[in-house]
Amino acid sequence: MNRHILAIVSLLAVLLPAPHYTAAAQTVGEDEQKVRSWISTIGSDDFGGRKPMTEYEDKTINYLAGELQKLGLEPAFDGSWFQPFEMIAVTTRPEKGRFTVKGRRKAELRYPDDIMVWTARATDKIDLRGVEYVFCGFGIHAPEYGWDDYKDIDVKGKIVIAMVNDPGYYDATLFRGRNMTYYGRWLYKFEEARRQGAAGCLVLHNTAAASYGWHVCINGHMEDNLALYDPSSRNANELAVKGWLHEDGARKLFNAAGLDMESALAAAKRPGFRSFSLKVKGDVKMDVSYNIQQTSNVAAILPGTDKKDEMVVLSAHWDHLGFGTPDETGDNLYNGAADNGSGIAGVLLAASKFVQLPQRPRRTILFLFPSSEESGLFGSEYYCAHPIVPMEKTAACLNYESIGPAPLTKDVVILGGGDSILDRYYIAAAAAQGRYIFFDDDNSDGWFFRSDHYNFVKQGVPSVVVENGLQAADPSKPDKYPMASWYHKPCDEYRDEWDLTGAIANMNLIYSVAISLANAE
């Protein structure tokens, strides 16, 4: 569906019977003042980058609880603002800073230039002797697409190398074309490798196919890799080795095997590819330090009226990356002002509007701030396994993710829409703002799977991704802070010169949809 058709659809949405929308623009100045205050506070150095299970967690979650309480909301978890759960934080280092492998030739994979590895096991050491490396294409077992990279290959006790993304990224006739499936996600590669009995899995990084550079792999996994903790097994069922493999590191492995990497990658992109052992082996020895602590989701509720046993969830993860690798200026604090201070501000803004309504909505509203999104969506995964109301009673999850800074645009980009029951709500809400929806079917970067809403989707709860638009309302005011310039970098800091007109409009768009869902028949 092109933009012109969507503009017409948006006009029709105004003319046809549609859910009720409140005028959100009347307090734009007040909205911006509140949003700037929340972002500048939560994104300040005082909050230390909001890394879970550090001293800055308590400060962050207590701040959020305080803001929710000031708004007059109720604690969501049996009288508590917090939903605690156990996590393990693991820091892993290869002995001597490298893995040595040998096939036809010998090679060294150096950490972290060639390889970034970690584990989720509660152990002091990982010690695998003479482990074999196997190239498994994309590492996908997808019968519905007629694709099985694990056919006729035994990977038990071996280390799987799996390319990031899925075959559709390279061939539009495969899978869903550029609209990446969950099979393309690095988390899936680990899950499938574990199901296949592998000892480890290394995801072969490619900047274009991953949609982010190698620095993201390093910054996200150098220290304190987080995972949900199972005290009964001490996470012994997890892969011994998880990691990312740089293309230069992969080339070393293939050279050690006496094979041409480019030919192997090209073959893996075509149907009928068969995985194979590189016949390269080596010891995997890693020193592990870990600690097991509690972290917490934070949430408040606004009880509904006649449909209070049903719920609309508004969510935004509170965590970020804390301290990490310094940038070129020497700054090593990842403030996370946009990611996800802007999302936090969006939920708080919606909460402030809900409590001011003259009549409470029919359905209960949950204002949820999950922990540990950056490390694998763990907080929302835990909430979805332990929800306040059953998932079948959850009408939708409206997730606020990196929603600013952004100038005002004529359009609003929706990812995961086009066939969602939420489409009509977003079309009508955008039309009420004099804007239109562009349903983006290019999920080549896997963005649809990369935030907390996806755990709700896996449980059957409707959700889409709202992204900043592409068509500037005022072309003379370009976007000075495009996402690529600050994503997961120390420079993601609040600035007074941020243009938040688009961000505020998008926040109010989601709020309008929330009201309609909360009161719909």
Image (spheres, grey):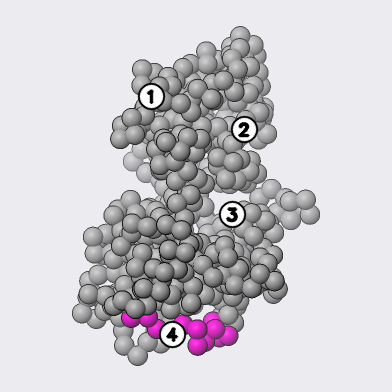
Amino acid at dot 1: Tyr
State the separation of the CA atoms marked 4 and 2: 50 Å
Relative to residue 448, is residue 315 depicted above or below? below
Residue 115 found in image quarter: top right
N-terminal of the two: label 1 or label 2?
1
Q: Earlier in the sequence, mark 3 or mark 1?
A: 1
| Sequence order check, earlier mark of 4 and 2 | 4
N-term mark: 2 or 3: 2
Q: Residues within 10 Å of mark 3 (few under 14, many from 20)?
A: many
Q: Which is closer to the viewer, label 1 or label 4?
A: 4
Q: Which mark is residue 150?
A: 1
Q: Return the residue nearer the eye: 438 or 356.
A: 438
The CA span between labels 3 and 4 is 36 Å
Q: Amino acid at mark 3?
A: Leu
Instruction: State the CA–CA distance, disc 2 to disc 3.
Output: 21 Å
Q: Secondary structure at mark 3?
A: loop
Residue occupied by mark 4: 23
Label for residue 237?
A: none
